[in-house]
Amino acid sequence: NPTMAKNRNFLKILKTLQSSGITLFLQIHDFAEDGRPQAYFHNETYPMDCHYGVINSRDYNILLKCGLRPRGLHRIFNTITPLPRKDRNSTADYVLYPVRAIRRKNIGEALLLSLFLPDGESLRISLPPNSPMDLESYNDWKRFVKTHRLAVGFEAGIHNDFSDLVRNAKSMITTSITEGFGFTFLEPWTAGKVLWGRKLPEICHDFEQTGINLDHLYSSIRIPLDWINPKAFSARWQTVFSTVCRGFDLHPGDNDIRQALDAVISGDMIDFGLLDEKFQQQVLVRIISDKSARQKLIRINPFLAGPGYVENSSELLRKNRAAVLDTYGMSGYTDNLLKVYRKIIETPVSHRIDRKLLLRCFLQPHRFSLLKWSAYAG
């Protein structure tokens, strides 16, 4: 990740190597501009006149827009390792979220989905986070589940063999609000498990182009704005947005910030994934305590009436598994990588990244999630 300031001297090192005649190929997995202002290089340009690689077409198209040329920009999709597969259908009574439960995995939404599972079914989340900034949120969710006696189990991957956990799961879910490559959309099919939950269209586009069908996933859960404290949300959102902008050396006016907030709210509704834990818990408490709220949410989001249900699931599993294994295996990866290396050796490039435009591509108000961009507020 050469564009992230985890080492503040890294860009200087790269430019020194380049000045000595070494051809650079810089592969980007994450951008500081995409939710990480603390890792932003404020006063330096990104390396110019070198080759760049990315792991998805979203980033490829953004960097083309920001000044890089196709001859010096390369897509290198990751490979996957198939998950353990069970030949017969599972009789298990749990849905698995096979994830380390960091904040951007949107644990609150996974709990929301669990409230709509059939009686007798539960949700299991495999691993805890290992960073202090995520542990506080995680522990609060554990307390919330205990207080409200939800059918959710944490740390299932610690207390059980992961292979058995996967083999025996009824299905798998994802509720993540941001991904780099998106393994979570591919791996379940290799285990013979239906994946359902939140879709990230810009990430999933690559997979769908290869024949992987993800039409049954949803891209938002719409929540009535009056289910949370609208004034508190407005104040919180504007404060966080302004703080993030300052972290990137931007200084929007009050009117600009209010217009940005208007882009988030659509018809007195808001996407659950744009809320932070405090507001997500307000929604969950309402659903838990008021049966009419549950029915109203189903009317707004009909897919909640049958979470995880997919027509012709056997055929979907067969086709998606074949497409995943055919496209994201090691042999195809090796061939593509060798082609990229030959281009790098044979093709000099002259281009640079427009950093201001890059920031605008990622810092888009209508997708500005408190869960992604804010510190945990408790």
Image (cartoon, helix red, strand yellow):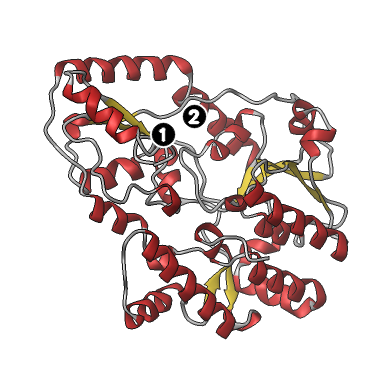
Q: Residue at x 56, y 29 (%)?
A: 321
Measured in 3D between alpha carbons, the distance from the residue under mark 1 to the one under mark 2, in whole angstroms, is 7 Å
Residue 332 location, quadrant? top left
Residue 38, relative to residue 348: is it above or below? below
Tell me whether the residue at label 1 lies in contact with that at label 2, contact meaning CB atoms closer than 8 angstroms.
Answer: yes
Disc 1 element: loop
> Tag 1: residue type?
Thr
Q: Residue at x 45, y 64 (%)?
A: 368
**Residue shown at the point (59%, 32%) measured from the top left:** 187
204 with respect to 361 (left or right): right
Residue 18 visible in the displayed image: yes
**Residue 149 in the image: x percent, y percent?**
88, 61
Please tell me whether residue 198 is drawn above or below residue 63 in the rendered image: below
Residue under numbered circle 1: 210
Residue 311 at least partly seen: no
Q: Which residue is mark 2?
A: 323
